[in-house]
Image (cartoon, helix red, strand yellow):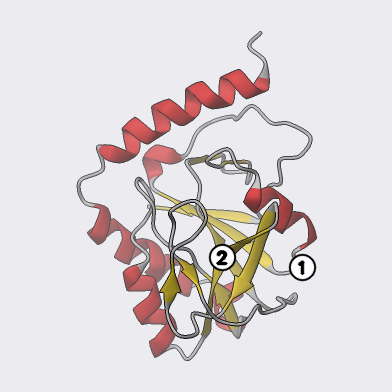
């Protein structure tokens, strides 16, 4: 049996390649965000934590437009120590420590009524998640009281993932 770290690394390589092959990303992203918006968790959430789109992930731009239209407060992740913090966009985005743009605004404490949309390279329908390997989301989600929904393309849904004790599952997964 392959140890979990090695199995995860192999699956990350495979899922990155698969993500590069999704050619109708924008169209499917619009549908994905419509499916998210149809959920009760979205309707009751005054604050929604989205993410800056990386390769292979759903395009977040249509979501940002929807959040504005629905008068939701948008927060985005910013690396804070070994984990993440939810922060307002503020004056705009600034270069992050890992090359991913981060919000420049104030940190927001999320509560149980808020919603966190979580990206990943792969998910299971039960909510297990394969991230990019830094553990930032796992550390953040461990203490986050908000509802968490993983979002991905159908090709990123797998039957099982190699899990370790530090891996945190999301409450639900939405895919298209």
Q: Residue furthest left?
A: 23
Is 150 placed above or below 92 here?
above
Disc number for residue 61:
none
Q: Which residue is mark 2?
A: 77
Q: CA distance from mark 2 to mark 1?
A: 15 Å
Query: Camera-side residue: 66 or 165?
Result: 165
Q: Position of residue 52 (x, y in %)?
A: 43, 62
Residue 154 in the image: x percent, y percent?
39, 44
Q: Nearer the viewer, residue 166 or 83?
A: 83
Q: Nearer the viewer, mark 2 or mark 1?
A: 2
Position of residue 162 relative to residue 37, above or below, is above
Residue underneath mark 1: 145
Left or right: 176 in relation to 21: right
The image shows residue 145 at horizontal and vertical percentages of 76, 68
- Crowd band around label 2 with a 10 angstrom C-alpha radius: few (<14), some (14–19), many (20+): many
Task: Please name the residue shown 68% across and 55% down the image.
Answer: 83
Instruction: Tell me the element at label 2.
Output: strand
Q: Quadrant of the N terminus?
A: top right
């Amino acid at each position: 049996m392959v140890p979990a770290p090695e199995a995860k690394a192999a699956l990350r390589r495979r899922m990155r390649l698969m993500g590069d092959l999704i050619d109708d990303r924008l169209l499917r992203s619009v549908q994905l965000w419509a499916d998210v918006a149809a959920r009760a968790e979205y309707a009751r959430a005054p604050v929604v934590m989205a993410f800056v789109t990386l390769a292979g992930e759903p395009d977040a731009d249509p979501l940002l437009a929807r959040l504005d239209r629905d008068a939701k407060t948008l927060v985005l992740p910013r690396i804070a120590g070994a984990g993440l913090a939810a922060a307002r966009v503020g004056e705009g985005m600034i270069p992050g420590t890992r090359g991913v743009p981060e919000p420049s605004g104030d940190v927001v404490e999320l509560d149980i009524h808020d919603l966190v949309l979580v990206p990943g390279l792969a998910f299971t329908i039960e909510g297990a998640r394969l991230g990019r390997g830094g553990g930032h989301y796992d550390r953040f989600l461990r203490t986050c009281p908000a509802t968490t929904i993983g979002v991905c393309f159908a090709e990123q849904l797998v039957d099982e993932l190699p899990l370790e004790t530090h891996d945190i599952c999301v409450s639900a997964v939405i895919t298209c």
